[in-house]
Structure formats: C-alpha cells, structure tokens
Image (cartoon, rainbow, N blue to C red):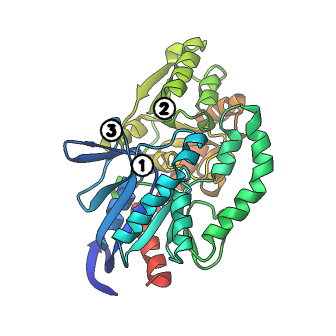
C-alpha cells in the first residue's frame, strides 16, 4: 500500500507502508553510538530510507575501528555477523553461521521488503539464495562481478585456472539465483535484461554537488587516484605511468587498503624515479574534503584492471575534473572515449601516460570532455537512483 507524499527537491515521492531490510557485507564499526562504514553506499541508503516506514541494514560488525561514512538516524544498523571472512576457507567454515543469521533476520521482519547487495563477498549471494529458497521476491542490487575480479586480482597462477574451470558454473548458478528477482545493476546489465532489470549509474552525488568548472592555464598539473589499494584497482600502473608522463605533474593518492597492499604501494612509490612527485594522502571521507580534492584535480586516473562500475569517475566529472580510465568491465558503459573521458587498455602504464599528455595539451578536448562529463554527472545522482529503485519496487513487489 502506498500513502502520503515525501518531498525530494522538486519531486513528490510516495512513501511505502513497509519496512525495507537491506543485507550487505561491508563491515561497520560502532563508536560512541555512531556507526561508520566503508561501503560508499551510505548516502544512497539514507535517501531511500526516507520513503519507507523503517529501514534496517544488516552487515558484519567489525572488531576494529576505522574512519568511514556514517548512516543517518533513519537507518537502523544491525549485525549480520561479528567480523567478516577474510579467505575462501574461512567463508566455507562460516557458511552455516551466515545461513542461520539470514534465517533469524527473515523471521524478525515478517512482511518486509528485502534488498540484497550482490554478491558482496558472497554474503549477499548467500542472502539472495536464502530468499530464493523461501520463494521471496526481492530487490537485488548487483554491484560487482566477482568472477571477473578474481581473474585480475593478483598474479597467482591458480586464479586463471579456477576462472576457466568455474566461470560457466558460476554464471549458471548466479542466473538461477537472480531469475525472477527484481535486479538493479550498477552500470551495465550483466546477467539479465528483461523488464524486471534496471540500470543505474551508482554514485553518491546529489544535484547540489555538481558544478561546472572554468579552464585555468597552469604550468604544473595535479593528478589524483581515489580508491582502494587492491591489486585489481590498478594503482600500481598509475604510479608506474608517472615516470613516462612528459608534462609537469604530481600524483596524489587518496584511499586505503590492508597492511600488505598498503606496504606494496609504499614500496613502489619509494622505488619510483619520480617519487618526489607522488604523495600518499590517505583516506578522506566522502563529503566536502573529498570534493575539495576533486576540485584541485586536473585529471582523475581510474586504472582498474576490472571494474563493474566505479564511482570516482562520476565524482570527478561532477566537479569538472578530467578522466582517464581503463577500457574494461562496465567503465565504457559510462566513460565514452573522447566524449567525457579517455579510455586506455587496462594495465598499460605507457598508455595512461600518453593519454594524460594528450589531454593536457588539447584545450578543445578538455572543454568538450568537461561539458559532456557535467551532463553525465547530472544523470547519475542519488535522486535518480532512488527514483529508479522506488519505481522497480512499486511495479514488481507491491
């Protein structure tokens, strides 16, 4: 049943007379009654929460504290589990625990609507499988393709063998889980494309965050990388590219990683012949401080080896920064070569460098890309994601 009207900027959106229960795998920590996450999806959930009687978010509770995004008071945070599996072996040992947790969550919310972030380190996949077994139709937010990420995550020889052997079974299994569910993809539709499948440009941008920028003549330029330090994010190739760039540039790195990944990046920077031009900024929370970094950036590098759909290039476009990104996964679905960004082969440091030099030397191309990027960002806001999600729920689940 739908009732009332809730204003959202210039919109009037109907409120749903139901609870919405969200299942995800990104850990949260609690400090002094506040909850902090690293998923980057908090603003999207906060906006959506206003349109339901109550929203619950279940994900693993971290045993550590960290800096991250904070949910509003409209979202009730509950632990899916204590801690999170770090390896596939630990996942196998904890499957029964996760299944029991999903059983308790389902029993605690009779009549609620469910939204599962998928596959989300297999916790989302397990939650979707449980709801499928219960014949519960739900919303599945597909945010990544772990099979393709496994293919490029690190250089271990067995990963490619597993990829070749498992891939057909993985896709078959995933399609069985997703069949007849309402699917909302971040970027490109990966598994199905029927009338219950939707696509959004996933970002945390609000209309008020998007600004045009005027070009300014400079003698030196600032490049930014914003993201995690996982191998498949390709940061190593951006650092390597710095030695090949002819223009006078510096690279500032915003992000975080586990101890091993962080040390690997620090060692690479130290060994670089242009180490003095590379700065490790650390983690910057989403909001004014991060927007200030994008405002400073002339070019944002997105050197991923695989990416289903990232947010950094949309955030860069929203603030007038130029984008050089890898032609891989779902990136070309949003970043169109020579329109709102330049695309390069994944893992090619020299191609990254050539794209940076070309872009900095071509004022006409810069203006074209800024104008096109502004329009892309305007179509990639939280408000549009909320609209699409509510339309999907109204059409298929109510």
Observer-side mark, 1 or 2, equals 2
Where is residue 192? Give x, y as percent: 66, 70
Residue name at image x 56 percent, y 53 percent: 122
Disc 3 on helix, strand or loop? helix
Q: Distance between the residues labelled 1 and 2?
A: 15 Å
Q: Residue tagged by mark 2?
A: 257
Residue name at image x 19 percent, y 42 percent: 32
* Disc 3: CA contacts within 10 A as few (<14), some (14-19) or many (>=20): few
- Image marks 1 and 2: residues in contact by CB distance under 8 Å: no
Position above or below: 222 against 40? above
* Disc 1: CA contacts within 10 A as few (<14), some (14-19) or many (>=20): some
Work out which quarter of the rendered image holds the C terminus and state it.
bottom left
The label shown at residue 289 is: 3
Where is residue 272? Give x, y as percent: 60, 15
Q: Residue tagged by mark 1?
A: 40
Sequence order check, earlier mark of 1 and 2: 1
């Amino acid at each position: 049943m739908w009732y009332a009207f809730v204003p959202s900027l210039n919109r009037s959106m109907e409120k749903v007379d139901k609870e919405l229960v969200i299942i995800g795998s990104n850990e949260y920590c609690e400090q002094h009654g506040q909850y902090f996450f690293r998923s980057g999806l908090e603003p999207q959930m906060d906006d959506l929460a206003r349109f339901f009687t109550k929203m619950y978010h279940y994900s693993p509770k971290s045993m550590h504290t960290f800096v991250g995004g904070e949910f509003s008071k409209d979202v009730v945070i509950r632990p899916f589990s204590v801690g999170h599996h770090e390896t596939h072996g630990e996942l196998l040992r904890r499957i029964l625990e996760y299944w029991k947790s999903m059983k308790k969550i389902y029993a605690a919310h009779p009549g609620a609507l469910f939204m599962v972030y998928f596959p989300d380190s297999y916790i989302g996949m397990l939650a979707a499988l449980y709801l499928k077994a219960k014949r519960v139709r739900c919303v599945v937010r597909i945010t990544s393709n772990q099979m393709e990420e496994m293919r490029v995550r690190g250089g271990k020889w067995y990963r490619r063998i597993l990829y070749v052997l498992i891939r057909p079974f993985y896709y078959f299994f995933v399609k069985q889980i997703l069949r007849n569910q309402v699917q909302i993809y971040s970027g490109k539709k990966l598994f199905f494309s029927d009338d219950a499948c939707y696509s959004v440009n996933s970002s945390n941008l609000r209309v008020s965050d998007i600004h045009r920028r005027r070009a300014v003549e400079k003698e030196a330029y600032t490049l930014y990388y914003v993201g995690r330090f996982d191998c498949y994010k390709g940061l190593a190739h951006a650092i390597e590219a710095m030695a090949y760039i002819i223009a006078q540039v510096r690279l500032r790195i915003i992000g975080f990683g586990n101890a091993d990944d962080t040390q690997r990046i620090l060692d690479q920077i130290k060994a670089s012949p242009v180490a003095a031009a590379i700065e490790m900024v650390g983690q910057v929370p989403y909001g004014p401080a991060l927007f200030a970094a994008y405002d400073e950036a002339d070019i944002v590098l997105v050197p991923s080896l695989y990416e289903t759909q990232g947010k950094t290039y949309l955030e860069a476009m929203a603030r007038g920064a130029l984008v050089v990104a890898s032609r891989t996964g779902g990136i070309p679905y949003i970043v169109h070569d020579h329109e709102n960004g330049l695309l390069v082969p994944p893992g090619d440091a020299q191609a990254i460098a050539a794209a940076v030099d070309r872009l900095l030397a071509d004022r006409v191309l810069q203006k074209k890309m800024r104008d096109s990027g502004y329009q892309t960002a305007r179509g990639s806001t939280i408000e549009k994601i909320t609209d699409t999600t509510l339309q999907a729920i109204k059409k298929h689940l109510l």
